[in-house]
Image: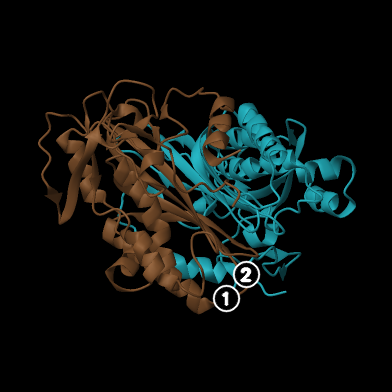
Chain colours: A cyan, B brown
C-alpha cells in the first residue's frame, strides 16, 4: 500500500456528517465553515520527524523550528488563506537539551511573528526520536479557498519560483539553495494575490509536481511574469479527460514524487 | 527544565496578538472566537508515541487508534465542549503493516463515530517509531467553556469516576481495569452536564490530580452523587491564597504527576 492508496482507503471509511465541514481529507487543508459566518476556517497539520524530515547533525535547532511552522503555513498559502493561529506538539528525544529547545522555539516563533500567527497551545512528550506536529488555522472569505478540485478545462497551469532549489541545497549544503532548504519562505502573500487574481486551484507541490499537479488560473486572468521577485511560469493547460493524467510533450507523465510508504 | 517550566518559558515568549484567540497555551484546549459568533471553538492536540504512551506488543492496533482520539476528546470534555471534527497525523514505523493500519483506523473511526466527530484531514509519514498526533476541534456557547482559571474561593472540588483504575489496569493487564486503560471512554456527556450545571472550572486529570488540581463547582450547585454510573466525589474546596498550593488534611501536597521531561 503506498501513501496515496492509504489516503484513499481512509477517505472511503470516513463519513461526512457535519455540513459545516465543507472540505475534508485530501487537500492541503480542511475547510470548516462556522454557521452563518462570512469566513471559512482552514486547518492543516504537518509532521516533522528526526531522520525523516531532518537530521540533528546537519540542521540547526532554529531551522527545524522555522521549517516545522513553514510546512503548515505553506498549506495555508496554497489555499489562499491568511494564517490565524497554530498549535505545536513536540516529542523530544533524550539528546534534546535546554539549548536545543530554546533554539527550536526561537526559529518557530520568529516565523510565527513574521507571519503574524499566534502559538495557541500544543502537547509535549518525550520520545526515542524527536518529532513535531504543527497545526495551523487560517481563514479565507466564505467559499473563496483555492481548492485542489477547482481547476477547469482550459485553465493554465503555473509554478511559482524555481523548482528544485531546495533539493539542490540538500545536495550541496551551501549557498542560497541550502539556506532555502533550511528556512523555506512560505508564500503567503503569493497565495493571497492568486486568490484575489481569480486562480481556480492551487497546491503545495513540495512532494513532487507530477504527483500533485493542479495549479491553475483561468485563461482570461492576467498573470504577471513575477510576484515579489518570484517568477510565475506557465507550464501547461488543464484539459478534459481522465482525472490525474498528466502529459508532457504528448506523453503521459507517471505520478512520481516523495511517498512515505514506498519501500526503498 | 521540567515540563511545567518548559511550558511557562514558551508561554512567556508568545505574544497574544489576535483578540479572537480568547485562551492560549496552558489549558486543556485553546479557545478561538470567530468574529460575531454565538459559539467559541476549542482546539486541542495530543501525542501518542510508541514506547512512551503504548507498546506494540501489549497494545492491539485498534486500542491505539481508539486511545489516540480518546485523549483529544477528553480535553474537549474537560472544557464542556461538543466535538466537531478532528485531524490525525500518523508517522508509521517500519514494522507497521496494512493489517495494523486497518486495525488502527478501525479503532479510531469507531470512537469517532460514537462521539460524532468527523476525521477531516491530517498527515502521513514514516518514522523510526510509530507516533500519532490528534487535533480535535470542539465548540461551546460563547464564553461558556470550563476554563482552568474559572475556580473561585468557596467552590467545591470533585473528581469523576474512580481514580487509579487505568493505572491498575496497566499493572495487572486484565479485567475491567485493563479494558479501561486500553479503551478509555472520554466523558463528553459529563462535561456537557457539568457546564450546564454551572461548574466553574474543569480539567482532565490524567497527568496526576495534585499536578492538575482545579476541578470545581460553585457551593450552591446541586451535584448528584453520580452521573451516568460515574461516581462524582467531593474532595475539597477552593480557598483564597497562593495559587497552586494544595493542602491535604492541613499539610501542603507537592505537585506530583507524570512529567515527560523529568530525568529518571
Q: Is residue A247 left or right of residue B109?
A: right
Crowd class of label 1 (few under 14; some 14 to 19; many from 20; radius 10 Å):
few
Q: Residue at x 21, y 49 (%)?
A: B189
Q: Chain of mark 2?
A: A
For label 1, the residue is: A1
Residue B126 visible within the image = yes
Q: Which residue is mark 2?
A: A261
For the residues bearing labels 2 and 1, Cβ distance under 8 angstroms: yes
Instruction: Report how far apart the C-alphas of labels 2 and 1 lie in the structure.
Output: 7 Å
Q: Residue B246: horizontal and vertical position, in percent?
A: 35, 33
Neighbor class of circle 2 (other Cα within 10 Å; few <14, some 14-19, many 20+) is some
Report whether residue A20 is seen: no
User: Image check: A228 left or right of A73?
Assistant: right
Disc 2 or 1, which lies upstream in sequence? 1
Parent chain of label 1: A
| Residue found 41% across the figure and 52% down from its top | B86
**Image coordinates for residue A29, horizontal then vertical, percent:** 51, 48
Element marked by disc 1: loop
| Left or right: residue A208 compared with residue B115 | right
Q: Quadrant of residue B128?
A: bottom right
The image shows residue A132 at horizontal and vertical percentages of 60, 49
Could you tell me how many numbered marks the image carries?
A: 2
Helix, strand or loop for disc 2: loop
Quarter of the image where the N terminus of chain B is located: top right
Q: Quadrant of residue A49?
A: bottom right
Q: Residue at x 67, y 39 (%)?
A: A101
Same chain for the residues under marks 2 and 1 in the image = yes
Q: Position of residue B191 (x, y in %)?
A: 24, 44
Residue A185 located left or right of residue B145: right
Amino acid at each position: 500500500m503506498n501513501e496515496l492508496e492509504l489516503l484513499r482507503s481512509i477517505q472511503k471509511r470516513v463519513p461526512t456528517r457535519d455540513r459545516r465541514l465543507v472540505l475534508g481529507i485530501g487537500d492541503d487543508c480542511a475547510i470548516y465553515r462556522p454557521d452563518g459566518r462570512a469566513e471559512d476556517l482552514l486547518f492543516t497539520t504537518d509532521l516533522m520527524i528526526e531522520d525523516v524530515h531532518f537530521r540533528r547533525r546537519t540542521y540547526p535547532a532554529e531551522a527545524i523550528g522555522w521549517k516545522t511552522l513553514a510546512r503548515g503555513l505553506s498549506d495555508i498559502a496554497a489555499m489562499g488563506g491568511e494564517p490565524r493561529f497554530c498549535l505545536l506538539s513536540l516529542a523530544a528525544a533524550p539528546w534534546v537539551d535546554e539549548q536545543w529547545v530554546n533554539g527550536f522555539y526561537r526559529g518557530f516563533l520568529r516565523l510565527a511573528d513574521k507571519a503574524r500567527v499566534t502559538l495557541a497551545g500544543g502537547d509535549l512528550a518525550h520520545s526515542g526520536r524527536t518529532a513535531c506536529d504543527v497545526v495551523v488555522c487560517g481563514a479565507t472569505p466564505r467559499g473563496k479557498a483555492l481548492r485542489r478540485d477547482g481547476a477547469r478545462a482550459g485553465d493554465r497551469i503555473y509554478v511559482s519560483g524555481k523548482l528544485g532549489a531546495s533539493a539542490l541545497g540538500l545536495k550541496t549544503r551551501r549557498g542560497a539553495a541550502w539556506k532555502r532548504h533550511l528556512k523555506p519562505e512560505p508564500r503567503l502573500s503569493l497565495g493571497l494575490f492568486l486568490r484575489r487574481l481569480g486562480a481556480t486551484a492551487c497546491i503545495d507541490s513540495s512532494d513532487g509536481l507530477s504527483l500533485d499537479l493542479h495549479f491553475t488560473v483561468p485563461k482570461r486572468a492576467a498573470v504577471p511574469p513575477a510576484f515579489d521577485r518570484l517568477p510565475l511560469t506557465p507550464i501547461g493547460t488543464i484539459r478534459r479527460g481522465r482525472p490525474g493524467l498528466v502529459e508532457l510533450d504528448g506523453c503521459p507523465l507517471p505520478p512520481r514524487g516523495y511517498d512515505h510508504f514506498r519501500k526503498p
